[in-house]
Image: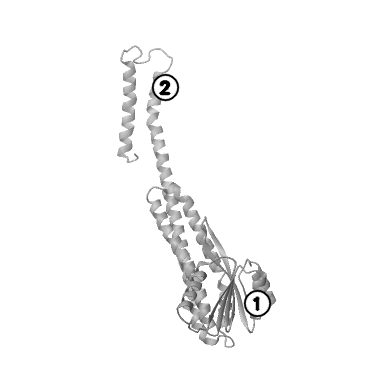
């Protein structure tokens, strides 16, 4: 599908899962090299940048949370000329869709204000990085819930949740790290004197700042995730130690009773209380007294 918006002398063409005919028509219209057409025709696994005298080409993968567990990378291809911006993608991306709706609303109300290709590029890229920022913030709110669960006695249930959150944030961090070199090269090329000139420098800085802000945010939440994992592991270990301590104390408390039962259960003559009518209850009393003595000792030592 081809989406097109014209702002004065500048055209934005957004290709969403284009057919080969649609792609070829747009590439021919703007004089784009066949090599780039081939790159756009199928997904590319890694970022890429390419510069020509007439336009600059960039491939980036923007992480996004999936409805199911985990994240996915959404590829966006950018071709930027002096009077046009072409974006190509293989699926719906909400931030780009929202920008389309904004432009369509402006077109319905009045004649769109003329703009420049560098302004348009900044709008698209900052919205994409803004969407990543929002996704990371949602992950941060999930960490708040995890922290609440940890200190509400749900340590075992949160082990899996912490792992899922950490894995999702790692994928965000990895995807953003892969933007570093190609994004810098792309922005530097557009800022050169024979393309957008120095007037693009400020816009390039804002695009880079949007990327850096998202990167710093995901790094901070990754640190929080590590701390939550350490805390959860400590609480789990403490809980397991308490269980083992309780079982050990019960076993020790049972030892005197076991010993008394063993002694009075020996098959020999002249066992004390053997002929006493209340012998059974006397032996039970000895067992209970021995257990109580150990219990009092444990309480004094604060072991129980």
Question: Which mark, residue 262?
Answer: 2
Measuring 43% from the left and 43% from the top, which residue is drawn there?
Answer: 240
Residue 264: image x %, image y %? 39, 19
Q: Nearer the viewer, residue 291 or 198?
A: 198
Against 134, is 229 above or below?
Answer: above
Residue 10: image x %, image y %? 55, 83
- Give the colouring mode of the picture: one colour
Residue 20: image x %, image y %? 67, 70
Label 1 sits on residue: 27
Question: Which mark, residue 44?
Answer: none
Quadrant of the rendered image containing residue 174 = bottom right
Gap in angstroms between the C-alphas marked 2 and 1 = 94 Å
Pointer 2 or 1: first along the chain: 1
Quadrant of the rendered image containing residue 83 = bottom right
Determine crowd level at label 1: few under 14, some 14-19, many 20+ residues with C-alpha closer than 10 A.
some
User: Is residue 219 in view from this perspective?
Assistant: no
Q: How many marks?
A: 2
User: Is residue 274 in view from this perspective?
Assistant: yes
Measuring 52% from the left and 74% from the top, which residue is drawn there?
Answer: 125
Determine crowd level at label 2: few under 14, some 14-19, many 20+ residues with C-alpha closer than 10 A.
few
Question: With 255 as the anchor, is 127 left or right in this view?
Answer: right
Classify mark 2: helix, strand or loop: helix
Classify mark 1: helix, strand or loop: helix
Residue 269: image x %, image y %? 40, 12
């Amino acid at each position: 599908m081809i989406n097109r918006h014209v702002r004065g002398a500048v055209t934005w063409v957004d290709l969403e899962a284009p057919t080969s005919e649609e792609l070829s028509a747009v590439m021919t219209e703007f004089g784009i090299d066949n090599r780039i057409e081939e790159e756009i025709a199928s997904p590319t696994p890694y970022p890429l940048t390419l510069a020509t005298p007439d336009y600059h080409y960039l491939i980036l993968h923007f992480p996004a949370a999936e409805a199911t567990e985990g994240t996915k990378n959404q590829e966006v291809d950018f071709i930027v000329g002096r009077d046009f911006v072409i974006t190509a993608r293989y699926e719906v991306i909400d931030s780009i869709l929202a920008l389309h709706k904004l432009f369509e609303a402006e077109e319905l109300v009045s004649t769109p204000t003329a703009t420049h290709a560098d302004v348009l590029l900044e709008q698209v890229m900052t919205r994409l990085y803004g969407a990543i920022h929002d996704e990371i913030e949602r992950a941060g709110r999930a960490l708040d819930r995890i922290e609440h669960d940890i200190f509400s006695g749900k340590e075992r249930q949160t082990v899996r949740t912490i792992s899922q959150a950490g894995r999702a944030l790692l994928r965000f961090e990895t995807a953003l790290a892969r933007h570093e070199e190609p994004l810098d090269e792309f922005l530097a090329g557009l800022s050169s004197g024979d393309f957008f000139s120095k007037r693009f420098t400020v816009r390039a800085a804002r695009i880079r700042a949007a990327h850096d802000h998202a990167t710093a945010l995901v790094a901070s939440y990754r640190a929080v995730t590590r701390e939550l994992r350490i805390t959860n592991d400590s609480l789990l270990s403490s809980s397991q130690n308490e269980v083992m301590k309780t079982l050990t104390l019960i076993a020790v408390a049972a030892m005197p009773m076991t010993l008394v039962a063993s002694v009075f259960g020996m098959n020999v003559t002249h066992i004390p209380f053997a002929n006493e009518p209340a012998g059974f209850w006397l032996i039970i009393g000895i067992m209970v007294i021995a257990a109580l003595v150990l219990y009092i000792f444990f309480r004094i030592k604060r072991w129980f």
